[in-house]
Image: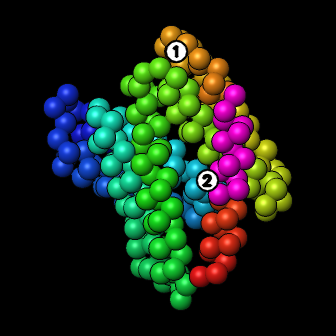
């Protein structure tokens, strides 16, 4: 992602090309690393991996509007890279097209939000910064809830929740040291957002993907 922050005169084409390229590689890698080790299998078979990298991309981009567009493009590219690798690996299956469509729509909704959140935590002003931090942290906490409450993988759920709590703490400390007045909103809103994310993931995975 170095080209994204190469200069203050970043061009939309350069930023979006770099973001799309990274997204394709991320999608390809998450498919290719399935089944290599138990840890990598869980990490790569996780919406958190795609979403956190999208927020990181937003933080690297200088312009807010470009960060939002970059978030959408990165999620679409990641989805495309994953399912392209799946097709080449002969595991796409008859329901692959519908599943890819669902995740693409989810990416179009969540990608801009995460791109905005990454940008806002690093470059925003006022109370939106801790709110944006909570948006990022809620992803990890929410997936931990899904793994535990939805799938009953409690060992992995505890690991995700622990990482989510640590990420929330780090973001809160970062915002406090940056002089954000209501930095504590990050820690207060992250658990609430986690519940919303859990319910959204449950709807996508159970209701939508279960029907395609």
The picture quadrant where one finds residue 205 is: bottom right
Of residues 162 and 174, the one drawn nearer to the viewer in this rendering: 174
Q: Which mark is residue 57?
A: none
Residue 49 spot, x, y in % from top left: 54, 50
Q: Is residue 81 above or below residue 43?
A: below
- The answer to if 198 sits in the magenta stretch is yes
Of residues 40 and 163, the one drawn nearer to the viewer in this rendering: 163
- Residue at left offset 33%, top offset 48%: 70
Q: CA distance from mark 1 to mark 2?
A: 32 Å
Determine whether the residue tagged by mark 2 lies in a helix, strand or loop.
helix
Quadrant (top left, top right, bottom left, bottom right) of the C terminus: bottom right
The nearer-to-camera label among 1 and 2 is 1
- Residue at left offset 61%, top offset 45%: 139
> Could you tell which of marks 1 and 2 lies nearer the N-terminus?
2
Residue 21 lies left or right of residue 34; in this view the side is left
Quadrant (top left, top right, bottom left, bottom right) of the N terminus: top left
Q: Is residue 132 above or below residue 208?
A: above
Residue 83 in sight here: yes
Residue 174 spot, x, y in % from top left: 54, 19
- Residue pushed farthest bottom? 94
Q: Main secondary structure of the magenta part?
A: helix
Residue 75 lies left or right of residue 7; in this view the side is right
Determine whether the residue tagged by mark 1 lies in a helix, strand or loop.
loop
Q: Which residues are magenta?
A: 188-200
- Residue at left offset 83%, top offset 59%: 152
- The answer to if 197 sits in the magenta stretch is yes
The picture quadrant where one finds residue 38 is: bottom right
**Residue hosting label 2:** 43
Residue 99 spot, x, y in % from top left: 54, 75
**Residue hosting label 1:** 180
Q: Is disc 1 in contact with disc 2, using a CB cutoff of under 8 Å?
A: no
Q: Is residue 120 above or below residue 126?
A: below
């Amino acid at each position: 992602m170095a080209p994204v922050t190469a200069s203050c005169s970043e061009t939309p084409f350069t930023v979006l090309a770099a973001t799309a390229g990274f997204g394709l590689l991320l999608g390809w890698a998450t498919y290719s690393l399935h089944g290599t080790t138990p840890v990598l299998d869980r990490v790569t078979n996780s919406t958190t991996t795609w979403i956190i990298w999208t927020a990181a991309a937003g933080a690297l981009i200088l312009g807010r509007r470009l960060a939002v567009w970059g978030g959408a493009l990165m999620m679409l590219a990641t989805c495309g890279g994953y399912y392209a690798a799946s097709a080449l690996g002969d595991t796409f299956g008859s329901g692959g097209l519908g599943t890819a469509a669902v995740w693409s729509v989810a990416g179009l909704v969540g990608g801009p939000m995460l791109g905005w959140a990454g940008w806002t935590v690093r470059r925003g002003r006022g109370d939106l910064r801790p709110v944006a931090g909570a948006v990022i942290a809620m992803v990890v906490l929410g997936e931990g809830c899904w793994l535990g409450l939805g799938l009953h993988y409690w060992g992995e759920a505890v690991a995700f929740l622990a990482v989510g709590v640590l990420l929330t703490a780090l973001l809160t400390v970062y915002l406090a040291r940056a002089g954000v007045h209501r930095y504590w909103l990050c820690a207060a809103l992250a658990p609430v957002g986690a519940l919303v994310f859990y319910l959204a993931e449950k709807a996508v995975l159970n209701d939508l993907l279960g029907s395609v």
